[in-house]
Structure formats: structure tokens, C-alpha cells
Image: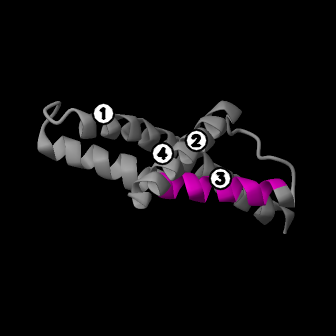
Amino acid sequence: MLFYAEIWNFETMALLRMLNRAAFICNICFLLALGFLHYKGLAREDLTSLIIVMGIFLSVVLNIVILLWLLILLFIKKPPDGISKPVIYINACFLAVQLFLLIKSNGN
């Protein structure tokens, strides 16, 4: 039983690390999407649409999922090992900016 719990914990942490990295990449796409929205003629339309979808929509969802998952792990047990703290802090800052822009854009 202990062996199964260790395997489940390893697979869960590997998934969390992968989602954390994917969220970081989507946050970079968020910065690019903001640039594309302000400067219309920067790139091709197909690449621009992919970056906008990843940056504006997918990054918000991934950031919320990851940060909620980390908060649950923090309340249940010690913080997970193997996940870099600077990337977690960067994702949290990006989420705050994204939610601020979302609330600001809905207020207009």
C-alpha cells in the first residue's frame, strides 16, 4: 500500500510540474498577446490567433488550476518538492494581473 502511495505521489507531482511549466509558457504568450493587441501588424494571423488563445484564455485557466492545487497541497501537507518557487511566484503575479485586466475590461 505504501508503494502505491509513493507512485501516486510521484505521478501527481510530475503532472503538477508539467502543468506549472505549461502555465509559464502560456504566461509568456500572454505578454506576446498583449503586444499583438496593441500593435496589429506584428505577425501572421494564424500564429497571432494561437498566441492570443494560449495567452489570454488558457493561461488564466492553468494559473487558477495550479495555484488552487498548490494551496490544497499546502493545507494538506508540506509544500511539494521539485517545483521551483520562483515560477510559482511568477505564475501568481501573472494571475493577479490577468484577473485585474479581466475585471477592468468587464467594467467598461
Residue 32, given in percent of the width and then of the height, sits at 33, 35
- Residue at 39% x, 35% y is 31
Give the residue type at disc 3: Leu
Q: In the rendered image, which residue does mark 4 sit on?
A: 22
Per the image, label 4 sits on a secondary structure element best described as helix
Horizontally, residue 2 falls left or right of residue 16, namely right
- Residue at 58% x, 59% y is 65
Contact check, label 2 and label 3, Cβ < 8 Å:
yes
- Residue 72 lies in the magenta stretch: yes
Looking at the rendering, the stretch of residues picked out in magenta corresponds to: 60-74
Q: In the rendered image, which residue does mark 1 sit on?
A: 35
Q: In the rendered image, which residue does mark 3 sit on?
A: 67
Per the image, label 2 sits on a secondary structure element best described as helix
Give the residue type at disc 4: Ala
Using the image as rendered, state which of residue 95 and residue 6 is in the foreground: 95
Using the image as rendered, state which of residue 6 and residue 101 is in the foreground: 101
